[in-house]
Image: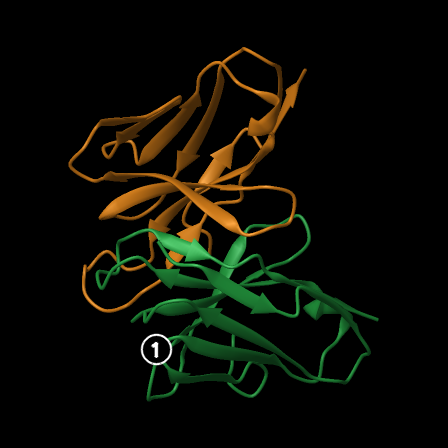
Chain colours: A green, B orange
Amino acid sequence: SAVISQKPSRDICQRGTSLTIQCQVDSQVTMMFWYRQQPGQSLTLIATANQGSEATYESGFVIDKFPISRPNLTFSTLTVSNMSPEDSSIYLCSVGASSMNTGELFFGEGSRLTVL
Amino acid sequence: SQQGEEDPQALSIQEGENATMNCSYKTSINNLQWYRQNSGRGLVHLILIRSNEREKHSGRLRVTLDTSKKSSSLLITASRAADTASYFCATDIRASGGGADGLTFGKGTHLIIQP
């Protein structure tokens, strides 16, 4: 298993500002993912955070809006840029349990953002 | 687009009863997983069933998989108040088995266990 810490756990932000969410894992992991969960909805994969290279973004998500860093195998950040109320969501960091892509995922507790 | 679709969207039962949730998906998969989420918190992995398996048990959980119908069910027996949560099925996005890909989650079933 992996223990994942996310910061901040929640924040209230003003329209037009940017916020960086941090994800710290207690062990080295190959795969790290960022998900978004809009109010009352399911999880949508934003991107895969790759160590040493650019993140791989899913359709509908772009680097300018959601820049991601992955400086090492235990840490990643997701920035939500130029926020609007539509960005109000829970953002979740997750890691793969093994090097295979079909294994289970471990999740952080999420960062609940409210944009006014 | 969402791969998994759960039904019902919401389910309310009495404590001690069994709860059954269903999930349908659209494309070929390597495996299907079920997760639980308590009120806006992180998800917890419950069980994984591989595409060549038909049924799997873990404690009070029973999962079935029918690849011909592209569907799965999660049964929670002898439900408890602590089982109140949202339950999501998830499949690997790209079934090629290669690369570091995430999961696609269904819309979820919100389960309420009434004491």
Q: Residue furthest left?
A: B52
B73 to A46, vertically: above or below: above
Dot 1: chain letter? A
Residue B8, picture quadrant: top right
Residue at image location 43% in from the left, 68% down from the top: A25
Is any atom of residue A82 visible in this view? yes
Residue A83, picture quadrant: bottom right
Label 1: state its secondary structure: loop
Characterize the local packing of mark 1: few (<14), some (14-19) or many (20 or more) Cα atoms within 10 angstroms. some
Left or right of residue A24, residue B61 in this image = left
B26 to A7, vertically: above or below: above
Left or right of residue B52, residue B106 in this image = right
**Residue A15 in the image, given as x and y percentages of width and height:** 80, 79
Residue at image location 32% in from the left, 71% down from the top: A28
- Depth check: give the residue in front, B17 or A56: B17
Quadrant where the image shows the C terminus of chain B? top right
Can you identify the residue that label 1 sits on?
A73
Q: Amino acid at mark 1?
A: Leu
Left or right of residue B69, residue A105 in this image = right
A13 to B35, vertically: above or below: below
Residue at image location 33% in from the left, 88% down from the top: A52
**Residue B108 in the image, given as x and y percentages of width and height:** 53, 40
- Depth check: give the residue in front, B64 or A30: A30
Residue B31, picture quadrant: top left
Left or right of residue A17, residue B103 in this image = left
B44 to A31, vertically: above or below: above
